[in-house]
Amino acid sequence: MNNKLFFSGLFMAAALTVSAQNNATITVHADQGKQIIPKEIYGQFAEHLGTCIYGGLWVGEDSSIPNIKGYRTDVFNALKDLQVPVMRWPGGCFADEYHWMDGIGPRENRPKMVNNNWGGTIEDNSFGTHEFLNLCEMLGCEPYISGNVGSGTVEELAKWVEYMTSDGDSPMANLRRKNGRDKAWKIKFLGVGNESWGCGGTMRPEYYSDLYRRYSTYCRNYDGNNLYKIASGASDYDYNWTKVLMELVGPRMNGLSLHYYTVTGWTGSKGSATQFNTDDYYWTLGKCREIEDVLKRHIAIMDQYDPQKNVALILDEWGTWWDSEPGTIPGHLYQQNTLRDAFVASLSLDIFHKYTDRLKMANIAQVVNVLQSMILTNDKGGMVLTPTYYVFKMYKVHQDATYLPLDLSCGTIDVRDNRRLPLVSATASKDKNGKIHISLSNVDVENEQEVIVNLPEVKATKAVGEILTSDKIDDYNTFENPDKIKLAAFDEVKIKNGSMKITLPAKSIVTLELQ
Ligand code: AHR
């Protein structure tokens, strides 16, 4: 093992000690799979924020941009291909200022509103309950409705549930019928508030716990609909919030949320999405991987109160948060997405797979044009699929597959803020047809990694798959050059005597299917 220093850009980056072991060994325990990776781990989040909804998902029927009933055709098709399992809406912070009745009925009669959280933008409410739930139906994904607790009433939330899910001769069901939808929608996931410690009401956990109990009481199960109620959870390292909620709400909630962003901090500049050096890159991956400790600590608290694991942990916001793209409205959180972001996605998903006995959903923030998006659009009809999109595309084989535990040994790198980053990350699963998929990330900027994958119990003779990589770690797709980073075929790998040797290029992400 050698030690070496990385240099980057014009500056000498902080010294990074590397155990420059350019090889890794993985043993996949294909006979030890117990836990299903819920497809909801691949959830999305669509907030009324910037151009996520207006311009991103929705342009309206009269737009010159090709659309299907008002939804952008290109975005719709890209999301359909991604097999989005669940989509959270309408926020985020927006949810606690959203009054759903303003977003139903003839569009020309809907009142305008100020989006106070996000740039003071005026919205016309043309995208409301019907538009969202119809989109989910068309995409074949579960809606996750985020209810207003911060500035709404118990009655308002109760009536929203009735409006969406009652099939009887009830006042709200009849109003829905008048607005063109006869049959009730099925709504499973209901969030009772969002970030109630902050934009959702600046509450103490004790106070919010009581509010949760009150609001959720009146969110009824109509006509065979069965709500899965999710309490507003902690931010990052706020373990006390989780403790208090488990103590005071406990089994009254089906899920408790958590938000964790890969962000440099909440004050001052968060750094550029595209201009960074090697040191920044490794720091980002170290911070991203810290989510594992954060999950473990929240889960340990939940285990104390709920050893049977009846209450799920729901990571309903995660991803990178950089400075907004220069020239865009700062409150709109529009950011570019480089190969660095793709690694944040792959490393995070690898971690999530390990904790699915408690972690039942994760929603990356956000689906289009906001933070770590899948898709970027412009108002001229341009669309870009981001490197993060391609990770989700490669990884969709893991949705609802059985998680296969694995052992991994590889070199590490010590990064800023005393974090140690393994150079290789991996995850494996077996799908319903018995096919095994393995995803591997080599985060090393300079060196390829020779990876030996031992597969005792596996009869396959070869592996085929796809790779995501690029020349530089700060490469990204633009409207002018949308295919700079995209998936490519990965050379077939032979499996001999239950083992395969893979050469992972520097800064690459690969998913293989064993055949
Ligand atoms: O995803 C952007 C914002 O981040 C959400 O609105 C809020 O819940 C969080 O602070």
Image (cartoon, rainbow, N blue to C red):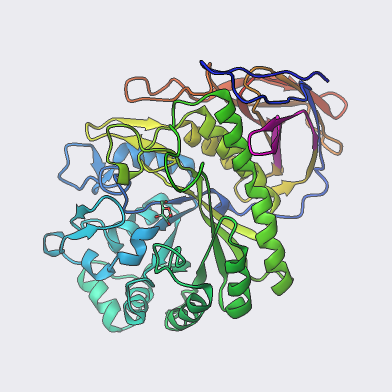
Which residue corresponds to the image point at 48% horizontal and 41% vertical from the top-left?
A: 82
- For residue 487, side relative to residue 114 (left or right): right
Which residue corresponds to the image point at 60% horizontal and 34% vertical from the top-left?
A: 283
Quarter of the image that includes the N terminus: top right
Magenta range is 408-428
**Residue 90: in sight, yes or no?**
no
| Residue 420 belongs to the span the image colors magenta | yes
| Residue 280 belongs to the span the image colors magenta | no
How many labels, in total? 0
Q: Position of residue 275 (x, y in %)?
A: 45, 25
- For residue 402, side relative to residue 86 (left or right): right
The one of 130 and 42 positioned closer to us in this rendering: 42
* Residue 324: quarter of image: top left
Q: Residue furthest left?
A: 108
- For residue 102, side relative to residue 502 (left or right): left
Quarter of the image that includes the C terminus: top right
Which residue corresponds to the image point at 60% horizontal and 36% vertical from the top-left?
A: 285
- Asked if 218 appears above or below 95 in the picture, the reply is below
Q: Position of residue 514 (x, y in %)?
A: 72, 32
Which residue corresponds to the image point at 63% horizontal and 70% vertical from the top-left?
A: 243
**Residue 424: in sight, yes or no?**
yes
